[in-house]
Every structure is written in C-alpha cells, then in structure tokens.
Image (cartoon, coloured by chain):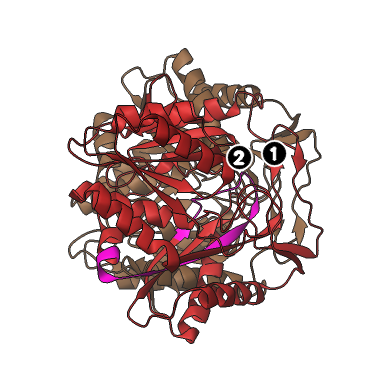
Chain colours: A red, B brown
Amino acid sequence: MKKFMNTAATMVAESLEGFVRAHDRLVVFGSGDKFIRRRNLKPGKVALISGGGAGHEPMHVGFVGAGMLDAACTGHIFCSPTPGQIIAAIEACDGGAGCLLIVKNYDGDVMNFEMAAEMVAARHRVETVFVRDDLDGGGSARSHGARGVAGTLIIEKILGAAAEEGADLDRLKALGDGLYSRVRSMGVALRGVTVPETERQTFVLDAGEIEMGVGIHGEPGRFRAPFANADAILARMSDAIIADLPANGRNAALLFVNGFGGTPVSELYLAYNATRRFAEEIGLTIARSLVGTYVTSLDMAGLSVTIALLDDEELRLWDGPVHTAALNW
Amino acid sequence: MKKFMNTAATMVAESLEGFVRAHDRLVVFGSGDKFIRRRNLKPGKVALISGGGAGHEPMHVGFVGAGMLDAACTGHIFCSPTPGQIIAAIEACDGGAGCLLIVKNYDGDVMNFEMAAEMVAARHRVETVFVRDDLDGGGSARSHGARGVAGTLIIEKILGAAAEEGADLDRLKALGDGLYSRVRSMGVALRGVTVPETERQTFVLDAGEIEMGVGIHGEPGRFRAPFANADAILARMSDAIIADLPANGRNAALLFVNGFGGTPVSELYLAYNATRRFAEEIGLTIARSLVGTYVTSLDMAGLSVTIALLDDEELRLWDGPVHTAALNW
C-alpha cells in the first residue's frame, strides 16, 4: 500500500491542516482544531453543522462556506467525530437562531450527534436531519436502514442556500425531511478501499468482479457481479434507483455522478453520459447535473449515481450562490 | 484492467459527450464535434485555443469558458488533435482580433498546432505560446526539452483573464512567454497508467517503488526511487523545483498540488501541507494555492507540484473571474 502519508496516526490532522491553509480565505479551525468552520459566520442565520469520519474528502470540510455548511467535524478515518467536537461546533456557530445538524445515517454518527444535541439542549435549540439516500444498507451490520452517501451533498447544498436566505430552524428541518424520499443513490466499486491503519483492502475484487451497492466505508455491497461494460453497469444502477423513487411527473431531476476517490474524471463523464441516456429513456427530465469527486471512500475505484427529484423551490436553492472549497458558483 | 468504458474506440467520444451534456450552459461542440468551445464567444476578444491528447481530463475541456479558453481540441488518448480540428477551432473562434494557441511542448502537439497555424495564416493572425514547465523531459524520446504539464493550467488561467479584459494578441504572447521561466513542475507516480487500448500499464512499479519526474503520458520518469513517507518525497520535489526557479525576492508564489487521476483528495491536501512547509522554510511566500485533480494521466496514482512565481499583475489575473467546468470563481 503506497499513499502520500507520514504516519497513519497523523494523516488526518496533516491533511486537514493542509486543507485549512489552502483555503484560508474561506475557513478556519475552531476550538483547538476540533472542527473547521466558515471564516465569516453570518449573524442571525441558523447554523448548519455536519461531519463524519475522515476518508470522504472533500465531504464535509469542502462544503463549509457561504451558502452551505457553517462547520464540519471530522473523526478518524471512517469513525464518527466525538460529541465533544460537535458540541464545540454548536457553541461556536449558533448565534441564537438555533442549529441544524445534518447527519448521515450510521450508528456511530447518529449516536454522537444525538448525544451532543442532548448535552447542549438547555442552551441551544437543535434539530437534526438524517440522510439516508443509499438504496442498500439494510443488510449491513454497520447501519440500520439506508445509509447516507453522496446524496448528502445535495441535502447540504439545498439547506445551506435556504439557511443563507434566512429560513428558520423549523423550515430547514421540514425542507430536509421533505427531501428524504426523493434523493436516492447507489454505488459500485471496481477496486476496494485500502485502510491506512491496517494497510489492507476491506474487500478484494479480482480482475473480473465488481461490487454493486457499496457504501463509503469499505463495507461490502449488496452483491458481487461480473465486470461488464459501462452501459451494462450503469443501466442496472439507473433502473434500481429510478424504481425506488416516487413516480412524480412534476419533478425535475438532478443527476449526480460521484467518484469514490480513485476514478478518473473521464470515466465519470462517460458514466454520466450513459446514465443520463437511460434516465431520459425512462422519461426523467434531467434539469441539473453534477459530475465529480465529492463524496469519497479513500482510494476506492468506483462511483455512485444519485438522482434527486426536486421541485421548483429546491431547484432554485440548488442554483443559489455557494462559496466553498468543493462547490463554488 | 477495469474501467468504466464500453469500447476503447468510443470511450473518448462518449466521455466528451457526457462532458458537454453535463455543462451545456458553458460549452457546445463545434464543427461536428471537432472541438469544444465556449457557448457564448465574446466579440472583439482574442481567441484562446488549446488542446492535446485525451486522458488528461479535466484539462483542457474543463478550462473552456469565460475567463479562460475559447476552445479545446481533444485527440485520441495521449495523441495530439489533428490540424483539421485545430483549424476548425480557429475558424470558429477568431472574430478578427486574432488567435493565441497554447501548446504543451510535445512533438505531436507542436507539429499539428504549427501546421494548423501555417494553413490559416492567410486568413487569421495566429501566435503560439509553448508550455514547458516540467523540470524533466530532456531525456525522453517523446519530447525535446521540457514538457508541458500541470503548469499549463496556470498559463491558461492568466492568459484567459488577460484576454477577457481585452489584451491584444501581442500582449498575450508576451505575457505567456514571460511566464516561461517562472512556472516549474515535477511529478511523482505511485502506480503507473493503464492505457485502454493495450490494457497494460506503461510502466509497472512494485510495492516498494515510486517513479520520480514522471510526465502525463505514461512515459517513465527521471528515476525510480524507493517508496518513502510523504515528507521525504515532497521535500525532494520541492528542493528540485525551487532550485530551478529564478531567485527573485519580489515575486509571490502560487503553489499548485495536482492529482494525476487516481489519488485521493485527502492525500493531495497532506502533500500540499508538507510542500508549503518546505517552500516557506526556504523563504518563499505562498500567496495563492490550488489543490485538486486538474491535469491527469488517466488513472495514474501520483501527483505533481507546481510553483509559479508571479508578479502583482499576474496575481491579479489569476484572481480574475473564471467560469469553466473545472475552475469557477
């Protein structure tokens, strides 16, 4: 296993330090490096806070900035941040309008974010939106119910725009919960994840195999399939995603093809092209697109497809200005 | 070799089609898919055109848009675009103010861009800026002199901003040539490139080896070294780059850490952190930073470091607004 690292124990801290130095106009460390927050907090605004294990970069630190998150808490690789980190972020960012936590649905994250919310309840009004966009996950020992994967970006962008415009905590909570049934993702891996601490791959695929329905923590997927051409893989994923979305002719679709960390940009665009064709054949209108490496699993080769069915107001919020390291428009 | 592709013969075309569909507010195909151009050309402006082999995405197509390139011509994987493609782009984009070609210094690219410039000389005023930012390359059979690698992005951004502001062809040519000695890059690979047509890696590294001084076409580097920790690798690269730059206390540095396609974002930020520390220890002032996957070599695991010494005017142009798929601020 070759990685650009010094020691497994320090790699997350060194990488985050690099991130903050590279983007020092946008972000700063808070409370002794417990979290990364937006450099200029906006008075009167509901604070949006997310976080999770390291290894998913640029999520969530790359989503901190105007129009998206106020702070992101990063744990060790694939491990939840501690309640102490989350409490520090809430205390630093809540200016009185309350705080919305955006939490991917994994046991560790759910437990620590809930514990933090409880512990500050006397001093801060806190609501939580859980992200459960993954098609699969029911069978995984690491999660109950669907997991939060690449769709997290879409939720954080839309809620971030609404918060920036002045939406209150109840409105943000309702907007986030309302998106739940209309954001669906599925992942596929061509090569598993090498975890720095163990220097081993969490699952090993041979030259003729792919893993369908993978999450972002190196856990096995729903099933192993023979390697096939891109059209065959993407048709299968598109079908599964679209079958799980509500039938709703009024909604336009946002199509998001996300690389897991080890996938070249050219392949992501090829996959986007195939997926868009299949989605349009089924009758979806692709109103917005995002293609890139945003929600990763260290060096895993593979990608996820997310389709979100959005109403006009949600599309408007998606289009709203955002100034973060990873999304900027 | 597992890639998201259908056939090696169609993968470039399918990927470019996906790119144009995903970014249809920014770009369109020109002249029967011979090139990708900015959707809304700006009247009176010098046309900036670049291009090269496929396999380096998002370069150059991701740099087409307001404030950067007017058109990009893409060849087959690691092969130059044809003179016919380049001529078509010149004819479509030159509105009378002339055309600046930005060409990475590889035999095939140089030959085809020069041939195109000659063939349109009676009808279009054309100048060329050659990019030769790679420290190494003198010994490679594929190039004469230093090659154009990640520093190309910096040249295209600065010239793009100047062109957008109305700089004329002579001014742009002088600005580009003036940057030559102050933009230097070096690359390192942890894993070689798998070329789709051959399904083979162009060079194979074992678990304890890295390739120092690599280019972006799968050609071998300057020398093979034992794998080492990030600080050791980046110190060696920083030293080599800084030694090759002119001593000039007045200039501020732009530090650009670029992933080659298979390198996780977290490792790029860790490498940036180490490089920035070394550069500052030597006395450089890092005034601007860029970290990400921009100039790639298919799925190669590795990265390049580029340092550009810029004067105040060049820094201002670097900061100027840009609206492309890959750079947007």
Q: Look at the numbered disc 1 and give the secondary structure of its residue.
A: strand
Where residue B138 sits in the image (x, y, percent)? 62, 39
- Tell me which corner region of the image, top left, top right, bottom left or bottom right, holds residue B181: top left
Q: Could you tell me which chain the residue with mark 1 belongs to? A: A
Q: Is residue B255 visible?
A: no
> In screen coordinates, is A209 left or right of B316?
right
Q: Residue at x 34, y 33 (%)?
A: A121
Q: Quadrant of the N terminus of chain A?
A: top right
Q: Amino acid at mark 2?
A: Phe
Where A307 sits versus A111, above or below? below
**Residues at discs 1 and 2 both on one chain:** yes
Q: Look at the numbered disc 2 and give the secondary structure of its residue.
A: loop
Q: Residues within 10 Å of mark 1 (few under 14, many from 20)?
A: many
Q: Is residue A92 visible?
A: yes
Where residue B67 sits in the image (x, y, percent)? 27, 53
Give B280 or A316, whichever is nearer the viewer. Answer: A316
Distance from the alpha carbon under mark 1 to that under mark 2: 9 Å
- Tell me which corner region of the image, top left, top right, bottom left or bottom right, holds residue B190: top right
Q: Is the C-beta separation of discs 1 and 2 under 8 Å? A: yes
Magenta residues, start to end? A291-314
B19 inside magenta stretch? no
Q: Could you tell me which chain the residue with mark 2 belongs to? A: A
> In screen coordinates, is A128 left or right of A125?
right
- Identify residue for label 2: A78
Q: Which mark is residue B13?
A: none
Q: Residue at x 54, y 33 (%)?
A: A75
- Identify residue for label 1: A195
> In screen coordinates, is A257 left or right of A298?
left
Q: Amino acid at mark 1?
A: Val
Give A217 or A227, whichever is nearer the viewer. Answer: A217
Where B93 sits versus B171, above or below? below
